[in-house]
């Protein structure tokens, strides 16, 4: 029995097939066009290892115009291999965000004169140029490059002065209680750090973007206090780190800002749950302010004191950090039997940092007061988000709140550690079990075919 197919049916079938082929070709062509014209990638590695952070993206947004990176690298390095590929792959992460970031290579062997003129010291060293300014980079990681770009983004040098001569925590000191590590971080981000001894200096320099006062240990002279108050009255910016100690002559500054400083130390029971001393106040609740915008890192404030204020009319005040939600301000002695006394102690939550802002002679004056100098000390700077919060405070005080701190991404531990027993099991499996399994399957297949 046969089936008769007329010519009309064959024609319709041919037309359908041709139409299907044309649609298929059109779809393939469209996919090819989109693949060439559209670039999209997903980073599925742990800790987003192949993607720059949001902080780096924000820094790139502050760089209008072209950025040029000139890499002085040979095509092959005996130790590092293909250096140019390493650099190109790394820089491409930034180029995905800023297409006008240009990368070019110069071979130090082929062009030794240009290399010497650029003062290149190492194979793979890069020179980053932006708007007539340039810096060298020898470390290939996100923190180093983004910090460098942050420095180039600043239109001019920001000067940070710190009060000296009275036993204060020093921004260049190396002792545990000093702020030297924090000062180094500021310099890496484009700030210039200098000490200020008002017993010698006539006044706080006018070109200082902000002054840092970090808990004097002896009383200031009346003339020094007058110079500090004049600095505030004229609209100078200030970062004041106050420990639970006497102010040593700085009461006029507190009165000018309307501060009400409670005697005593903040006690945080939540710290004890983390095996910390109860005098370590944990910061996890932050106010609505540019300093703490999108800030979600925990911070640690050792031996903190409460920062209160009576809100003078000319100042706009914002609390920055609240601690000790279930704690209190201990006004008694700090001994092993610390407990809340409702008759003398102050229950939490406790504000330990606040931002002050006002208008003075057509400019904005900014002040940040923190009830713990130790939180930026060399001992505690690396705890939680202490460094990030400190950098954000300084950036805001210097009117650079758009430039935020960038910390290196932590490298996730991807090593697999096996016991000796598991190593033997896996080795036996690969060397014995798998080969025997393959031989068994081959034998079964051979036996079945032999029966056919």
Image (spheres, rainbow, N blue to C red):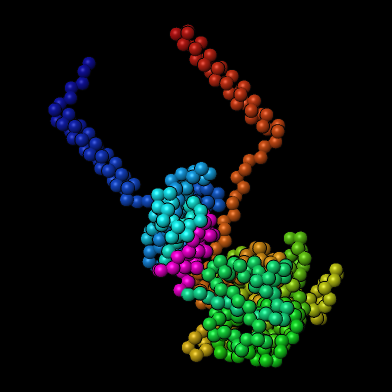
Q: In this view, which residue lies farthest toward the top?
A: 451
One can see residue 426 in this view: yes
Q: Is residue 144 above or below residue 340?
A: above
- Seen in the picture, residue 317 relative to 95 is either above or below; the reply is below
Taking the spot 40% from the left edge, 52% from the top edge, the residue there is 111
Quadrant containing the C terminus in the rendered view: top left
Taking depth in this image into account, of 195 and 211 the one nearest to the observer is 195
| Quadrant of res 320 | bottom right
- Name the side, left or right, on which 292 lies relative to 58: right
Q: Name the quarter where the N terminus is drawn.
A: top left
Q: Position of residue 451 (x, y in %)?
A: 47, 7
In reply to whether residue 431 is colored magenta, the answer given is no
Q: Is 135 within the magenta? A: yes
Q: In x, y percent, where is residue 227?
A: 63, 89
Left or right, residue 208 beside residue 348: left
- For the point 49% across and 12% down, the residue is 446
Write the residue at 55% across / 52% down. Answer: 47
The percent position of residue 258, horizontal first and vertical second, equals 65, 88
The answer to whether residue 229 is seen in the rendering is no
Position above or below: 370 against 150: below
Q: Position of residue 307 (x, y in %)?
A: 68, 80
Residue for point 59% across, 74% down: 193
Magenta stretch: give its range.
131-155
Tell me: 77 left or right of 14: right
**Is residue 413 depicted above or below 242 in this figure?**
above
């Amino acid at each position: 029995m046969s089936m008769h197919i007329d010519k009309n049916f064959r024609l319709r079938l041919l037309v359908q097939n041709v139409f299907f082929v044309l649609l298929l070709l059109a779809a393939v062509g469209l996919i090819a066009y989109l693949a060439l014209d559209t670039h999209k990638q997903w980073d599925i590695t742990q800790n987003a290892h192949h993607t720059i952070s949001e902080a780096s993206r924000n820094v790139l947004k502050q760089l209008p115009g072209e950025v040029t990176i000139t890499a002085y690298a040979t095509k092959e390095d005996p130790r590092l291999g293909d250096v140019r590929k390493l650099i190109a792959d790394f820089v491409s992460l930034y180029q995905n965000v800023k297409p006008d970031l240009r990368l070019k290579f110069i071979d130090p062997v082929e062009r030794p004169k240009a290399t010497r003129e650029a003062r290149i010291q190492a194979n793979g060293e890069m020179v980053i140029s932006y708007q007539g300014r340039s810096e060298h980079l020898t470390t290939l990681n996100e923190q180093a490059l983004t910090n460098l770009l942050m420095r180039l983004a600043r239109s001019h040098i920001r000067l940070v002065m710190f009060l000296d001569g009275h036993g204060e925590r020093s921004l260049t000191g190396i002792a545990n209680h000093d702020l030297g590590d924090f000062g180094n971080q500021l310099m890496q981000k484009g700030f210039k750090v200098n000490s200020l001894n008002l017993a010698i200096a006539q006044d706080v320099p006018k070109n200082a973007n902000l002054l840092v006062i970090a808990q004097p240990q002896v009383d200031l002279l009346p003339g020094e206090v007058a110079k500090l108050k004049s600095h505030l009255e004229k609209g100078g910016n200030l970062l004041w780190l106050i420990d639970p100690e006497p102010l040593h002559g700085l009461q006029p500054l507190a009165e000018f800002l309307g501060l009400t400083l409670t005697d005593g130390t903040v006690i945080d029971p939540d710290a004890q749950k983390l095996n910390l001393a109860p005098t370590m106040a944990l910061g996890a609740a932050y106010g609505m302010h540019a300093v703490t915008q999108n800030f979600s890192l925990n911070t640690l404030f050792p031996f903190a004191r409460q920062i209160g204020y009576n809100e003078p009319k000319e100042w706009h005040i914002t609390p920055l950090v609240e601690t000790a939600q279930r704690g209190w301000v201990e006004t008694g002695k700090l001994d092993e039997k610390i407990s809340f006394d409702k008759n003398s102690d102050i229950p939490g939550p406790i504000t330990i940092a606040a931002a002050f802002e006002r208008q003075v002679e057509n400019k904005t004056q900014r002040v940040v007061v923190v009830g713990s100098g130790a939180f930026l000390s060399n001992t505690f700077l690396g705890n939680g988000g202490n460094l990030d919060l400190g950098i954000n405070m300084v950036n805001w005080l210097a009117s650079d709140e758009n430039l935020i701190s960038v910390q290196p991404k932590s490298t996730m531990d991807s090593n697999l550690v096996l016991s000796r027993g598991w190593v033997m099991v896996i080795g036996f499996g690969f060397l014995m079990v798998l080969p025997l399994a393959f031989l068994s399957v081959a034998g079964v297949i051979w036996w079945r075919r032999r029966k056919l």
